[in-house]
Amino acid sequence: MGCSICTVISNKPVAEGLYLMSVEAPGICSTALPGQFVHVRTGDVIDPLLRRPLCINRIDSGNGTLDLLYRVVGRGTAALAGKKPRDPLDVLGPLGNGFTVRGNFRNALVIAGGMGIAPMFFLIDELIRTEKYVTLLWGARTAAELFVSSADFAPGGLTLHTATEDGKAGHAGYVTDLLASILEQLSDAGSARAYTCGPVPMLKTVQKIMSGRGIPVEASLEERMACGIGVCAGCSVNTVQGKKLVCKDGPVMNLMEIVYDE
Ligand SMILES: Cc1cc2nc3c(=O)[nH]c(=O)nc-3n(C[C@H](O)[C@H](O)[C@H](O)COP(=O)(O)OP(=O)(O)OC[C@H]3O[C@@H](n4cnc5c(N)ncnc54)[C@H](O)[C@@H]3O)c2cc1C
Ligand code: FES
C-alpha cells in the first residue's frame, strides 16, 4: 500500500451522474487485486478533508492505468467529476483484501446491483483470464446505466443477464429475480463460486437465496469510511464472528457470515 500523486488520463460521463476516470498509477496497478479499493483525496487542498473510498474498477497493467467508476452523490464525487486530463490526483492504495479468483472451481456467478458493478470489471477480467465460466447478473435502475456489453470482455468468457427497474432492458424488475432460475441452470453447482456487490436490500436477498446451497459467496461491502485504515472503527459490520471492519477485514467478506438487522 502506498500513497501517490497520480495523473488523470481521462474523466468522462458514461451515463447520467455516472463517470469513468482513468488514472496513471503504475505502482498501484502492479500489486492490485480485484475487490481492493483506493482512498482518493478528491479536493485540491483540504476541502473535502476526508478521502473517499472507490473500488478499483479495472486495471491495464501494461499501461499502468487504473479505472474508477463512480456516481456523483455529494461534494467529494462532484469534485472528482471536475477533474481534467493531466490533473494530479492523490490516491492511497491498494487497500483492503480482494476476491478469491484462483482455486478449483469452473463456474463463477457475479451478481451486481447499481454501483455494485464497479469492482466487477476487474474481477471478471481476472476470472476469464484464469479460464472460469462467468455468468454476470447485472441490475440497474435504467437501461442507460447498462453501459457495457459482453463484447467489452475477452471473447466467449462471459454470459450476461440484465435487469432494469424501468423495464427497458433485460428482465423488468430486480436482478435477484433472476438468481434462483440461473442457479437451477448451473450444471455443476458443486464447482461454483459467487461474488456480489450492491445495495444492502439486494445483499440480504442474495444471502437468502444462496442459503443452504453450499456455494461460497463473497460480497464487497460498502460502509461510510473515515480513516480507511482500521483506526477509527467507523466502518464496522456485524458478522457471526463479531464486529469486523470493512476497510481492514474487507471490503470483501463472506456474505453468509454477515448479520443484518431484520
Ligand atoms: C470500499 C468502498 C468502495 C466504494 N467504491 C465505490 C465505487 O467504486 N464507485 C462509487 O460510485 N462509489 C463507491 N463507494 C461509495 C463512495 O465512497 C461514496 O459514494 C462517496 O464517498 C461519497 O462521497 P461524496 O463526498 O460525493 O458524498 P457525501 O457528501 O459524503 O455523501 C453523499 C451521500 O452519499 C452517501 N454515502 C457516502 N458514502 C457512502 C458509502 N460508503 N456507502 C453508501 N452511501 C454513502 C451519504 O450518506 C450521502 O447520502 C465505495 C464505498 C466503499 C466503502
Ligand atoms: S474507516 Fe476507519 S476503521 Fe474503517
Image: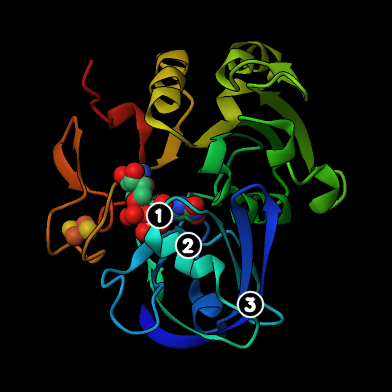
**Residue denoted by label 1:** 74
Q: Position of residue 107 (x, y in %)?
A: 66, 34
Q: Position of residue 180 (x, y in %)?
A: 59, 12
Badge number at residue 78: 2
Q: Position of residue 19 (x, y in %)?
A: 62, 58
Mark 1 Cα within 10 Å, few/some/many (few <14, many 20+)?
few
**Going 53% across and 33% down the picture, which residue do you hit?**
194
The correct choice, above or below, for 71 with respect to 158 in the image is below
Mark 2: which secondary structure? helix
Left or right of 119, for residue 184: right
**Going 45% across and 31% down the picture, which residue do you hit?**
216
**Residue denoted by label 3:** 65
Residue labelled 1 has its Cβ within 8 Å of some atom of ligand 1: yes
State the quadrant of the C terminus. Answer: top left
Residue labelled 2 has its Cβ within 8 Å of some atom of ligand 1: yes
For the residue marked with disc 2, what is the amino acid? Ala
Q: CA distance from mark 1 to mark 3?
A: 25 Å
Residue 187: which quarter of the image?
top right
